[in-house]
Image (cartoon, rainbow, N blue to C red):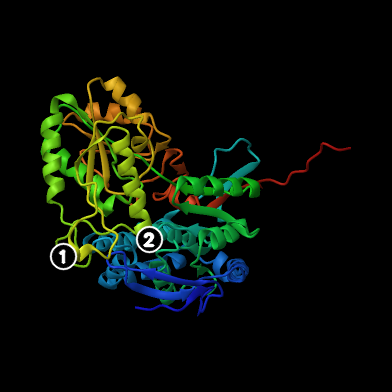
Amino acid sequence: MSLQKIFVAGVWREGRGEPLMTTFPADGSINAELRAASIEDVEEAVALADQAWRQPAWRTLLPHQRAAILHRVSDLIAAQQEELAELQTRDNGKPLAETRGLVASAAATARYFAAVCEVQEGEIPPARSQQLITLSRYEPLGVVAAITPWNSPIASEMQKIAPALAAGNAVIVKPAEATPLLALKLAEIFAEAGLPPGLLSVLPGKGSVIGDALVRHPLIKKISFTGGTKTGRALAHIAAEKLIPASLELGGKSPTIVLADADIEQAARGICYGIFSSGGQACIAGSRLFVHRSVWQPLMDRLLSLTRQLRLGHPLMPGNHIGPLISHAQRQQVMDYVALAREEGGEILCGGEIPADPALAAGSWFQPTIITGLDNRARVCQEEIFGPVLVAMPFDDESALIADANHSIFGLAAGIWTRDSGRALQLAEQLEVGTVWINTYKVFAISTPFGGYKQSGLGREKGLQGIKAWMQQKSIYLATTPTINRWSD
């Protein structure tokens, strides 16, 4: 598999940056070799995007006409689902069953924002004068930057590109260095769907070079970033200096709570999926487990049984649950955290090692791991590991539970398992997180806003607010009768 070009303002050409190679995490084989974008490519892409955005043919294009392009994009993604899913699997190693779901999500995102684009309305505030009508309308920002992660590229990229274009902007995408293939494929799909040239560019390369040049560019009017909290904070500083909006979807250390009346089977399966799907490489992974002491043993027994049955195997083969981690470097980080857990006094109940299967030797594999015996203040309970590692802790008192669940710099998501929905809703109100799942986990709807509290980010993606995040509001005062301002002599 080889891909030699980048996408600059509607034109495929060789990048002017350093050589870039992407590999298949399952076995280390090469996916593609290309030259990354350069600073010159950034300058050219932004300048052409600004020209394309200012053209009346785009800025004044009627909403249903922009929607038509997004509908075609949705249809093209759906028609190529298997090809795109396999490409996503090769890009980051997720099992094919998961990547099929991500592709379907991307198609649904394009379709949803096509609909939102058509029905979005301005506002007519209540009159405060007999002689005035006031109007409020939403307008595009201009050229915007979308910086996307490696763990779910096609879904994350569409959650930025689709609403940004629906809002009337031009978009520059900087995909993760390890996973550029899906963003480049989406550029091809948007071009085929009829998106005018210049309105979309995809610039692979290092975040410290291409991402930094992009977000600092004076013509970039918004930054949208999904990734680590450290980088997010740095981008927030740049946005503050430029006085431009930033949407940041950052890290998480999500608590999952099992109350005394929970359905043990349902909870165990949900917890297992919430932490071990995607190899734990998800910002919303349920990595801290709090279990009421009265159900601790049966819950842990069932959870351990399910975890030991999970199949690690080639992500393109059916029936496997867990693929490799994104890289050997990421695996080493996870291993270091497991070693730290041992130093802190934790007990490894299962996993904690590289699998012994010779068929997996070339890839960056790691066993699903469950740790007990630690306090919520331990580093492995406070720092994002981004791997298949769960720390389980019993609790007795619900007020102490809430304090522990909220004791984190992060506030992205949480899960609650109980038969009492009223109690669950009361508990959900007390959790300092942006998303709470009750008797389920890690399910999404494009119509429902997503984002975090605290250092898990700023702003929201998805939902009706998702398109307004890419727009600015303008108020208009219209005099209904001729008036003269007579304050002067």
* Numbered circle sitting on residue 318: 1
Alpha carbon distance from label 2 to label 1: 21 Å
Q: Viewer-proximal residue, 224 or 30?
A: 30
Q: Residues within 10 Å of mark 2 (few under 14, many from 20)?
A: many
Pinpoint residue 366: horizontal percent, then vertical percent.
25, 53
Quarter of the figure that contains the C terminus: top right
Q: Viewer-proximal residue, 40 or 452?
A: 40
Q: Quadrant of residue 208?
A: bottom right
The residue at the point 58 percent across, 38 percent down is 127
- Secondary structure of residue under mark 1: loop
- Secondary structure of residue under mark 2: helix
Tell me which amino acid carries mark 1: Pro
Q: Is residue 298 left or right of residue 278?
A: left
* Numbered circle sitting on residue 279: none
* Numbered circle sitting on residue 153: 2
Q: Is residue 273 left or right of residue 432?
A: left
Pinpoint residue 16: horizontal percent, then vertical percent.
56, 75
Figure check: 398 above or below 323: above
Tell me which amino acid carries mark 2: Pro
Pinpoint residue 193: horizontal percent, then vertical percent.
41, 74
Pinpoint residue 447: horizontal percent, then vertical percent.
35, 50
